[in-house]
Amino acid sequence: MKIKLSDIKSGFQNRFFDIPTDSIPNRGTKFKSNNINCTLSSNILQKNKFKLKGKVKAEVIYECVRCLKLFNSKISLPVDISLIDKLKNNDKIKDDDIVEILNTEDDFDISTLLGDIIELDNPIKPLCNNECLGLCTVCGINMNDISCNCKIEKGYGLWKELKKLETKEH
């Protein structure tokens, strides 16, 4: 998604963008629909410094780590990007999240930044719900759908090979 530099430099408020997901760089995120929504405002901080603030909303598809079912999750993430035009050697940057605007084009492509924001929000261990029972370790059925009669015997040998290892005390 490209935003005109002239718009950023003049400032705008609550502009709505409907962004096709295929224009976002592939970071591994799977989207439910073909579009994500983004509402942004541009503020002028100084002569050559600008701020893009707003929200990006999407519906993402995750795979549950317990039962392996796919599930949808609606996300609404803040966007807070500082931009600087013509970074000079004597400019002191207090904010680590500043993106330099290169004057080679008339547009600023925000697609990569939005892709990064969405991907960084992905949970490490996505769960379809907190009460997910997962898969049976013996027969492999999804215990959320039906229960099984498998019994795991105490000390059934899962760790017996590890017990054979010698431990050295220091």
Image: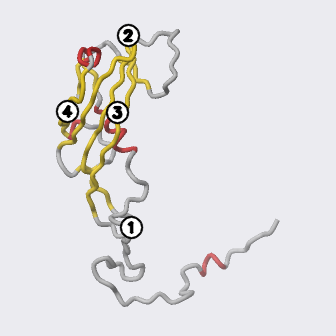
Q: Identity of the amino acid at label 4?
A: Phe
Q: Identity of the amino acid at label 1?
A: Asn
Name the element at disc 3.
helix
| Image x and y of residue 136, in percent | 39, 79
Q: Is residue 146 above or below residue 50?
A: below
The residue where tag 4 is placed is: 16
Q: How many marks?
A: 4
Q: Identity of the amino acid at label 2?
A: Lys
Residue 99: name its quadrant.
Answer: top left
Name the element at disc 2.
loop
Q: Earlier in the sequence, mark 4 or mark 1?
A: 4
Point out which mark residue 47 bears.
Answer: 2
For the point 31% across and 57% down, the residue is 62
Point out which mark residue 130 bears.
Answer: 1
Q: Earlier in the sequence, mark 2 or mark 3?
A: 2
Residue 170: name its quadrant.
Answer: bottom right
Q: CA distance from mark 2 to mark 1?
A: 49 Å
